[in-house]
């Protein structure tokens, strides 16, 4: 059982080391036929530190988790929960979609 939770403990260690509010770091672990899904919840003030400039920190954490997973023959995915009240995702969804490109692909 300890080996199975190694990925969760590893993620918690890394994120708590980076975060200004380590007490707010929560990692939920789910296993299904697709592999392991680690869902990370953090203090909204730490979001910038964990994502990093242009997503570099999050990308590095995901790479490290893939290495840990490969060592234990598991596929590990990381989902970072967006803090409540965030508008980042909504702004992106409100952008108009260029359907001409999709229409060009249709046969």
Image: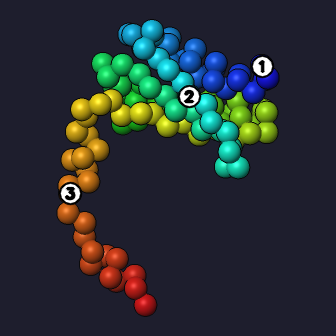
Rendered image quadrant of residue 73: top right
Q: Residue at position x 32%, y 22% from top?
A: 44
Q: Which residue is mark 3?
A: 95
Say above or below: 51 vs 42: below
- The residue carrying mark 1 is 2
For the point 62% across and 36% down, the residue is 30
* Circle 3 residues within 10 Å: few <14, some 14–19, many ≥20: few
The spot of residue 8 in percent (x, y) is 63, 24
Q: Secondary structure at mark 3?
A: loop
Residue 5: % across, % down:
70, 23
The vertical placement of 12 against 107, above or below, is above
- Whichever of labels 1 and 3 marks the residue nearer the N terminus, that label is 1
Q: Residues within 10 Å of mark 2 (few under 14, many from 20)?
A: few
What is the distance, in whole Å, between disc 1 and disc 2 at their CAs? Answer: 15 Å
The residue identified by callout 2 is: 28
Q: Which mark is residue 87?
A: none
- Look at discs 2 and 3 and give the one toward the viewer: 2
Kindly report the distance in space between the C-alpha atoms of the residues bearing marks 2 and 3: 32 Å
- Whether residue 103 is visible here, answered yes or no, is yes
Left/right placement of residue 69 relative to residue 91 reads right
Across and down, in percent, residue 31 comes to 67, 39
């Amino acid at each position: 059982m300890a080996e199975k939770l190694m990925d969760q403990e590893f993620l918690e260690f890394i994120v708590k080391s980076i975060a200004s509010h380590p007490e707010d770091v929560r990692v939920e672990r789910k296993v299904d036929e697709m592999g392991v899904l680690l869902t990370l919840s953090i203090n909204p003030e730490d979001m910038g530190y964990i994502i990093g400039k242009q997503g570099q920190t999050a990308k590095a954490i995901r790479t490290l988790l893939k290495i840990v997973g490969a060592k234990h023959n598991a596929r590990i995915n990381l989902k970072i929960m967006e803090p409540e009240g965030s508008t980042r995702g909504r702004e992106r969804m409100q952008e108009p979609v260029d359907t001409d490109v999709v229409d060009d692909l249709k046969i």
